[in-house]
């Protein structure tokens, strides 16, 4: 009985190790624009200045909020972007301050908290858990993506591959 309890406790304690966050600080994926504006207004590290940081894409009617935390000496954030799809926040992009942080330190902390990345390349490291895609991109950008919204948006795009892309795929398939 004690072994079963110990195993259960071990599994329960390991779950947070692999559960990815759905955002950073007060900015969370899935928020509507008004909730995010209020959260950013109260969280000074983002450097949100109000409605002048909000823009609307004329092509698809989606909102984008761009902030700059570098104006505050205490912030580890530079420029940040918050992208919306279907009126919900689905991508958070944080440029981290390279004068205060380095890629290796951020990568090491993410590995410590969330395990080895699912994808690793010279350009980026990616962790996935079904709900969130967390990526650390070089030189020092952290990106949180709502996996379901991203997949839905990708599936709904009707962009066909170019002949060069098709030829590349055919070549790779022939290997």
Image (cartoon, rainbow, N blue to C red):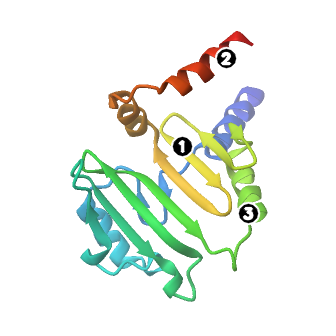
Distance from Cα at disc 1 to Cα at disc 3: 18 Å
First of labels 1, 3 by sequence position:
3
Q: Label 3: how many residues lie within 10 Å, few (<14), some (14-19) or many (20+)?
A: some
Q: Which residue is mark 2?
A: 171
Q: Label 2: how many residues lie within 10 Å, few (<14), some (14-19) or many (20+)?
A: few
168 left or right of 30 in image: right
Question: What residue do we see at 37% from left, 38% from top?
Answer: 149
Provide residue 51's location: percent of width, then percent of height.
25, 75
Question: What residue do we see at 68% from left, 58% from top?
Answer: 138
First of labels 3, 2 by sequence position:
3
Front in this rendered view, residue 110 or 174: 174
First of labels 2, 1 by sequence position:
1
Q: Which residue is mark 1?
A: 133
55 in relation to 137, above or below: below
24 in relation to 162, above or below: below
75 left or right of 136 in image: left
Front in this rendered view, residue 30 or 100: 100
159 in relation to 16, above or below: above
**Callout 3: helix, strand or loop?**
helix
Q: Which residue is mark 3?
A: 103
Q: Are marks 3 and 2 in contact (CB under 8 Å)?
A: no
Provide residue 50's location: percent of width, then percent of height.
28, 78
Q: Label 1: how many residues lie within 10 Å, few (<14), some (14-19) or many (20+)?
A: many
């Amino acid at each position: 009985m004690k072994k079963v309890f110990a195993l259960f406790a071990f599994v329960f304690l390991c779950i947070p190790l692999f559960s990815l966050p759905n955002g950073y600080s007060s900015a969370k994926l899935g928020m509507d624009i008004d909730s995010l504006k209020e959260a950013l207004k109260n969280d000074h590290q983002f450097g949100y200045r109000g409605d002048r940081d909000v823009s609307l894409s004329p092509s698809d009617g989606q909102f984008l909020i761009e902030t700059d935390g570098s104006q505050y000496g205490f912030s580890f954030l530079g420029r940040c972007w918050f992208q919306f799809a279907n009126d919900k926040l689905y991508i958070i992009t944080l440029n981290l301050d390279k004068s205060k942080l380095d890629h290796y330190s951020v990568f090491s902390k993410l590995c410590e908290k969330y395990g080895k990345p699912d994808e690793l390349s010279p350009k980026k490291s990616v962790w996935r858990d079904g709900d969130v895609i967390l990526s650390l991109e070089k030189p020092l950008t952290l990106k949180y993506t709502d996996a379901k919204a991203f997949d839905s948006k990708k599936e709904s795009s009707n962009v066909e591959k170019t002949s060069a892309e098709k030829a590349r795929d055919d070549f790779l398939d022939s290997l």
